[in-house]
Amino acid sequence: MIVTLNPDEILLCQMAGRMRSLIARTASITDVKMGNQDGIEADIMGMMGEYAFAKRFNLFPDFGLSPRSCSADGKLRDGTAYDVKTTHYKTGRLLCTLKENRDVNIYILAIADKNTINLVGWAGGAQLRQEENLIDLGHGKGYALTQDKLRSMDELSYDR
């Protein structure tokens, strides 16, 4: 499921991502990413994934700039809380840290390539957080699912 962002949307995501990163580091919130990417770039890319998901499902993205840790990126119409995980790797996996996030029901994998975001698939928290999904990518253990194990984005409806 491809979502294309226009230049204004990209600029908005860049500004919000940079501000989120600055506010989180100023508030001493630990950056718990699983890869070795730059924190600011990860926050910008994450904002692009969140924005693309909200755009595709006709939701308003969360542009809140208050310090936060372990919270959902948003909610679907039925109240399902979601967390979008964004990477630039074409073969990227859906990742989450060991830190349990009880506020999230589903995780979505987004792959960013310049102005294009591919919403690849999703998994429920219980499906992702299983012992057989533990992996260490060199920055500590976390959970990972390959793309073939994700549920189709078509299973998420606009009415959810």
Image (spheres, rainbow, N blue to C red):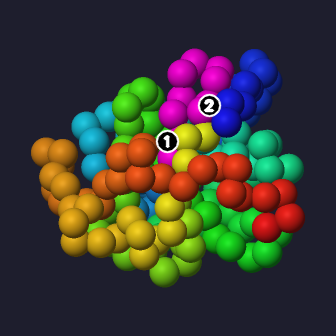
Q: Are marks 1 and 2 in contact (CB under 8 Å)?
A: yes
How crowded is the residue under tag 1: few (<14 C-alpha within 10 Å), some, or many (20+)? many
Q: Position of residue 49 (x, y in %)?
A: 60, 41
- Tell which circle, 1 or 2, labels the residue nearer the N-terminal end: 1
Q: Position of residue 94 (x, y in %)?
A: 41, 50
Nearer-the-camera pick, 76 or 70: 76
Label disc, if present, on residue 117 of the rendered structure? 2
Please name the amino acid that badge 2 sits on.
Answer: Ile
Label disc, if present, on residue 22 of the rendered structure? none
> Where is residue 130, by image quadrant?
bottom left
Magenta span has 24? no
- Main secondary-structure element of the magenta-colored stretch: strand
Q: Residue at x 28, y 42 (%)?
A: 35
From the image, tell me which residue sits under label 1: 86
Please name the amino acid that badge 1 sits on.
Answer: Thr
> Where is residue 39, by image quadrant?
top left
